[in-house]
Image (cartoon, rainbow, N blue to C red):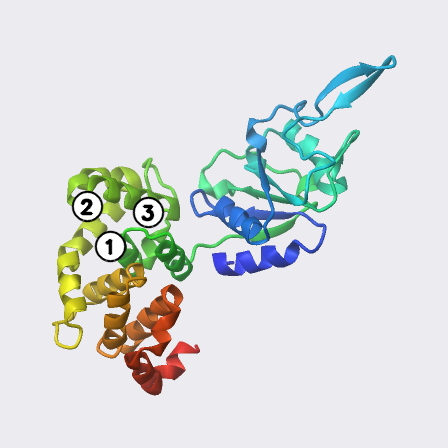
């Protein structure tokens, strides 16, 4: 399921006791979704990397009390006084079988030996699939049967909304809008390949270097050679920021891009700068000049960033002609 649906499902599943397991390839944002869902519910997250544990770590160590051995639970598990939260078992199927076996009782019975998981704590796990060429061990049927299994699928529209909110580089956002298939690819023999994580990485590098030209030789080492070549070709036809500023300065008369790549660039840049009142006002004019399908995307982005956008005369004109497209 795509990220927006997965978030909704996780929020609903919090109301019951059964643990959930999120399956997906590396770099797609499994752990980010868990943290975002927990933050929305105002719950703390304990991120427990099962792959880093030894079989004895979960049980703790014994101490002597009145001649008897009493097990002291590890500090990384929530104490009895801890408020409700989420226990996130990341990379659980990258843990050796003996560690997985140690999790059986915790996952199903919410206890390990004398330790008991406090009330209000929900268990979520995540892991890569065997076909993702990540380090994994076959999960035993006994442990697998203790989870509600959820398959994570990348979705370009969901990623775009997230990327705009995080203010990633507009050129990266517009490229994925134009080439959604390159958001994520299965890993091959090369070390680098495109994933949502690697595109975020490239965006950060572009920002640090002050533009793509200064770091073009790094792109292949971040998103893979094929994706880097296509991204470079896309940039040759993309608008510059100076071009877009000229359009914002005179939205009624400025020459607009005719190619899809150019329109994607303009739309994504407007979305990233939508909090600016001048950009928002220009956007109310531009949504009536670009093709309707892009006008819808731009209108939704501008409304998300600036609620006052709905009062712009240009928005009302657009609604009168294309309002039916916004409710799809």
Judge whether residue 257 can be spotted in this image. no
- The image quadrant of residue 307 is bottom left
Q: Is residue 309 left or right of residue 114?
A: left
Up/down of 35 relative to 273, above or below: above
Most extreme residue toward the top is 67
Q: Position of residue 39 (x, y in %)?
A: 55, 49
Residue that mark 1 sits on: 171
- The image quadrant of residue 258 is bottom left
Residue that mark 3 sits on: 199
Identify the residue at horizontal 44%, vertical 47% (top origin). 28
Q: Is residue 35 left or right of residue 177?
A: right
Q: Callout 1 environment at 10 Å: few (<14), some (14 to 19), or many (20+)? A: many
Judge whether residue 204 can be spotted in this image. yes
Residue that mark 2 sits on: 212
Up/down of 244 relative to 200, above or below: below
- Disc 1/disc 3 C-alpha distance (Å): 11 Å
Identify the residue at horizontal 20%, vertical 47% (top origin). 229
Asked which secondary structure carries label 1, the reply is helix
- Quarter of the picture holding the C terminus: bottom left
Asked which secondary structure carries label 3, the reply is helix
Q: Callout 3 environment at 10 Å: few (<14), some (14 to 19), or many (20+)? A: many
Identify the residue at horizontal 65%, vertical 24% (top origin). 57
Identify the residue at horizontal 12%, vertical 72% (top origin). 254
Q: Position of residue 242 (x, y in %)?
A: 13, 58
């Amino acid at each position: 399921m795509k990220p927006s649906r997965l978030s909704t499902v996780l929020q609903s599943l919090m109301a019951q006791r059964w643990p959930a397991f999120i399956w997906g390839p590396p770099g797609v944002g499994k752990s980010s979704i868990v943290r975002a869902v927990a933050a929305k519910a105002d719950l703390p997250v304990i991120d427990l990397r099962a792959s880093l544990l030894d079989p004895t770590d979960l049980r703790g160590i014994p101490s002597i009390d009145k001649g008897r051995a009493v097990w002291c639970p590890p500090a990384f598990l929530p104490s009895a006084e801890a408020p409700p939260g989420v226990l996130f078992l990341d990379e659980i199927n990258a843990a050796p079988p003996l560690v997985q076996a140690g999790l059986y009782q915790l996952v199903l019975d919410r206890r390990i030996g004398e330790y008991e998981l406090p009330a209000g704590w929900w268990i979520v796990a995540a892991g890569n699939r065997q076909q993702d060429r990540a380090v994994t061990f076959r999960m035993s049927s006994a442990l697998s049967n203790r989870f509600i299994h959820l398959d994570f699928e990348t979705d370009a529209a969901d990623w775009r909304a997230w990327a705009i909110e995080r203010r990633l580089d507009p050129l990266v956002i517009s490229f994925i809008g134009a080439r959604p298939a390159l958001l994520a690819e299965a890993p091959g023999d090369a070390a680098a390949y495109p994933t949502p994580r690697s595109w975020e990485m490239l965006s950060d590098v572009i920002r640090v270097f002050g533009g793509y030209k200064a770091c073009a030789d790094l792109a292949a080492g971040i998103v893979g050679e094929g994706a880097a070549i296509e991204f470079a070709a896309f940039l040759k036809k993309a608008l510059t920021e100076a071009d877009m500023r000229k359009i914002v300065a005179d939205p009624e008369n400025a020459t607009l891009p005719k190619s899809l790549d150019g329109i994607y660039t303009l739309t994504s840049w407007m979305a990233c700068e939508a909090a600016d009142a001048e950009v928002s006002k220009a956007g109310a004019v531009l949504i009536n000049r670009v093709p309707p399908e892009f006008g819808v995307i731009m209108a939704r982005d501008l409304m998300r960033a600036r609620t006052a956008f709905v009062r712009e005369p240009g928005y009302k004109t657009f609604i009168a002609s294309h309002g039916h497209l916004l409710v799809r």
